Every structure is written in structure tokens, then in C-alpha cells.
Image (cartoon, rainbow, N blue to C red):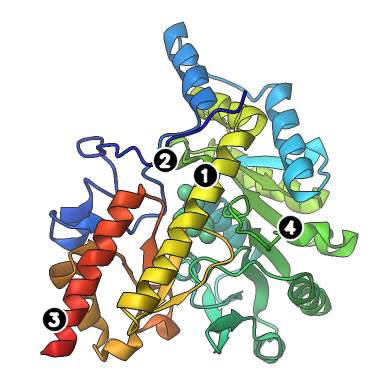
């Protein structure tokens, strides 16, 4: 029997210590706005996950936990089934989150003064982490032509000098939504191999990919690439489980993995929490049908957004994502300076989105909108933006 999941249900997240909802006054200084910023979803997790968590709660004892065989099997099966990548159990290392893993990797595999390449506009904590560790950020901006982003691979080659040790790849790419092609990833891998760089491939968004696109794990392309790769995956974005702080760091190279595990152990952050273990395993085992329906719902949200903006708010261009529920909006035609644009969206449209410039200088004039919400909320936000833009353009 096919279950039909209800993504239209509006769930009140206020007073749940939600970053996205309850965190509005702290981050934006306002509360009566529609939150479309933090990258989590306003949907409940898949019912099998909720059920399994209930059972775990009912057990009543929440002591120290390890990851059982079934946890590893569920992760390996998921990667094979969804991404055609066979991973060895021993490759799987752990971290509470992807960001702590990226920090530890950069700390372990570079020295102060070394450099790390990122391709901007990109998920903003990357540059913050690199700088906070006393490493240099080398920006290799994406190209943007005819409404489409691509990697500047020639630029990448030109920017790599002897200080560069790591490239952080965002695959698929937050915030522009690209699912990198085999050609792009291969060429990138060749450049990194030639220059002996480690590739940290952050694939946290890999499970939410729209019609006509296929995610390719960077490490799956060749043994040579796998050998210099660290692939970060998690059920966090896929099943809305980010708060459970459970992710897998897949490292085929023994030396790199041992070093990463040493860092994890030195901080004693390798042990899982019992809820994260249960939720991850059950989501990977039984969440697929829910995920298929989620992607369909997000695709409909996206199609609606694109149509609505084209017809009613043509001043703002939607950069059509190939993956992720994060949509990159080109607002440059509104003619507002960076801070004016933020204030306009917040105070006039009353929608809280991420400011484009936090993702890099080439994000000025853009906003990132999270469309993982019930359709009624998306519709309301679009109407509010439309009214504000009409008022602005008439003034
Ligand atoms: C590309 C990317 N990497 C990492 C994260 C955060 O990962 P974690 O919560 O596991 O540290 C996010 C969250 O939005 C993200 O978009």
C-alpha cells in the first residue's frame, strides 16, 4: 500500500527552540516575518523515523551507545542504492556534524599560513572555519553566464600555489543549486591530483536532486580521486534530522582516515547519541518512499516559485536549482545596495532570507530562499515579496 505523506500540514515550530523560527529576533531583530533562512525543513521527519524514536524514548535508558552493524549496513546500502557508490565499512568515520569534520580535517592536514580553496558563492561557514584556524582562503569564484553557474576550472589551476593544500567542494552546491557534472568533477579531480590537494567533498545535499539530474559522489569517479577524498554525508538535510547531530565521513585512504580518527578521538566526539543512531538507520532503511514524495513536493514548490516570479515579479530572477531546497534569487535589477536589499526583504516583504553577500562577494545583490515549507507558506511569502516589489517600483 502506498502511503501519501502530507507536506501541506503547517506545523507550529514556535517555542521549540528552533533556530529558524525562535531565532528570528536574535538574528534579524524582528519576529513577525516568514522565516526562509536556516537550511532545515518545516516538515516532520518520515513516520518510520518518528515511530522508531518513540520506541527508543519509551525504553527510558539513554546511556552510552555505539553504532551497531545495522547502522553501517543501512548507510552502505543507501549509498549503493541511491548513488551507485559501493563503500567499504571501514571507510566510514563519524562526526556529530559536517562542519566539525571540516574543521578537524583542515586543522589536521594544513599548517597555519597554508591555504584552502573554495568556490564562491558558497556555504558561508567554509570561509569562517578556514580563517578561524589561521589558514588562508583562496577564492575561486564560480562563473555566472546566462543565468547558469559553473566552475572556473582554468581559474582554479591558476590560483593554486604551493600554499594550497585542500579544496572544499560543495557537491551539490549550496547556494546556487548546481549538481556538478561528471566532466566538471573529473577535471576538478585531475587538477587536484596534479597539485596534490586533498578534496573535502561536502555532499550533505546529495539526496535532494530534481528531475533530470543525478548526483555523482566525487570519490566514486576513480580510485585515484577516492584516495585523496573525504566525503561528508548525513541524513540531516534529506530527512530533516539536523538537530540529531549524526553524520558520516567517508575516507577510503587509511592514512587520512587514521589521522582524522585521531583528531576525533582526541576531542572525544566520536560517540553517537542514541537518537541519532536510531533515526539515521531507520531513515536510510525505510525513508525512501517518503523522500521520493518530498522531492516531488519540493519540485512542485520550485515550479510554482519559478512561474510566480516570472509572471509577477520579473525583476527578481530565480536561478533554477538542480538540487537542494535553497533557491538563489538574483535581485540585482531592484537596484538596491546590499544592506538596503536585506532591509527591503525583511521590513517591506517581511520574509527572512540569507543575505547573498555572506556566501562571498559575488553574492551581493542575491538572496537565498528556503522553500522547504508547506505550499501555503511559500505562496504567502511570494505574495508579500510581490507587493513590496510593486510598491518599490512604483515609488
Ligand atoms: C553545504 C553544507 N554543509 C554543511 C552544513 C551543516 O552541516 P552540519 O550541521 O552537519 O555541521 C550545511 C547546512 O546547511 C550545508 O548546507
- Residue 25 location, x and y as percent? 15, 55
Question: Any mark on residue 183, and which?
Answer: none
| Secondary element at tag 3 | helix
**Label 1: which residue?**
294
Depth check, front residue: 12 or 266: 12
Q: Are the residues flagged by discs 1 and 2 in contact, CB closer than 8 Å? A: yes
Question: Any mark on residue 391, and which?
Answer: 3
In the image, farthest residue toward the front? 311
**Label 2: which residue?**
7
Whichever of callouts 2 and 4 sits on the residue coming sooner in the sequence is 2
Whichever of callouts 1 and 2 sits on the residue coming sooner in the sequence is 2
- Relative to residue 315, is residue 158 drawn left or right? right
Which quarter shows the N terminus? top right
For disc 1, the neighbor class at 10 Å (few under 14, some 14 to 19, many from 20) is many
Label 3, label 4: how far apart the Cα atoms are: 45 Å
**Label 4: which residue?**
217
Amino acid at each position: 500500500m502506498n502511503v501519501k505523506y502530507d507536506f501541506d500540514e503547517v506545523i507550529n515550530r514556535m517555542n521549540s527552540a528552533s533556530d529558524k523560527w525562535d531565532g528570528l529576533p536574535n538574528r534579524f531583530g524582528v519576529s513577525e516575518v516568514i522565516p526562509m533562512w536556516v537550511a532545515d525543513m518545516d516538515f516532520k521527519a518520515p513516520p518510520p523515523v518518528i515511530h522508531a524514536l518513540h520506541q527508543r524514548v519509551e525504553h527510558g535508558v539513554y546511556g552510552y551507545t555505539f553504532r551497531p552493524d545495522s547502522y553501517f549496513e543501512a548507510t552502505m546500502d543507501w549509498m549503493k542504492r541511491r548513488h551507485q557508490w559501493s563503500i567499504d565499512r571501514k571507510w566510514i568515520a563519524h562526526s556529530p556534524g559536517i562542519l566539525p569534520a571540516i574543521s578537524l580535517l583542515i586543522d589536521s592536514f594544513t599548517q597555519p599560513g597554508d591555504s584552502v580553496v573554495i568556490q564562491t558563492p558558497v556555504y558561508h561557514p567554509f570561509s569562517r572555519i578556514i580563517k578561524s584556524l589561521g589558514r588562508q582562503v583562496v577564492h575561486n569564484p564560480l562563473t555566472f553566464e546566462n543565468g547558469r553557474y559553473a566552475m572556473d576550472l582554468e581559474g582554479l589551476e591558476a590560483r593554486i600555489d604551493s600554499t594550497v593544500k585542500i579544496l572544499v567542494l560543495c557537491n551539490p552546491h549550496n547556494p546556487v543549486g548546481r549538481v556538478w557534472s561528471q566532466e566538471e568533477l573529473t577535471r576538478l579531480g585531475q587538477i587536484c591530483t596534479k597539485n596534490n590537494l586533498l578534496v573535502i567533498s561536502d555532499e550533505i545535499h546529495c539526496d535532494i536532486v530534481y528531475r533530470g539530474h543525478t548526483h555523482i559522489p566525487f570519490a566514486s569517479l576513480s580510485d585515484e580521486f577516492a584516495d585523496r577524498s573525504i566525503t561528508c554525508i548525513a541524513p540531516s538535510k534529506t530527512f530533516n534530522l539536523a538537530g540529531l547531530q549524526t553524520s558520516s565521513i567517508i575516507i577510503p585512504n587509511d592514512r587520512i582516515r587514521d589521522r582524522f580518527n585521531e583528531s576525533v578521538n582526541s576531542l572525544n566526539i566520536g560517540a553517537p547519541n542514541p537518537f541519532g543512531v536510531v533515526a539515521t538507520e531507520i531513515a536510510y532503511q525505510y525513508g525512501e518512499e517518503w523522500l521520493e514524495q518530498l522531492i516531488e513536493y519540493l519540485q512542485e514548490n520550485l515550479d510554482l516559485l519559478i512561474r510566480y516570479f516570472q509572471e509577477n515579479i520579473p525583476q527578481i530572477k530565480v536561478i533554477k536549482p538542480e538540487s537542494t531546497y535553497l533557491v538563489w534569487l538574483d535581485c540585482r535589477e531592484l537596484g538596491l545596495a546590499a544592506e538596503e536589499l536585506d532591509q527591503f526583504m525583511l521590513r517591506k516583504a517581511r520574509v527572512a532570507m540569507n543575505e547573498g553577500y555572506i556566501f562571498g562577494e559575488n553574492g551581493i545583490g542575491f538572496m537565498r530562499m528556503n522553500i522547504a515549507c508547506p505550499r501555503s507558506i511559500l505562496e504567502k511569502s511570494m505574495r508579500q515579496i510581490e507587493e513590496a516589489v510593486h510598491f518599490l517600483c512604483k515609488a
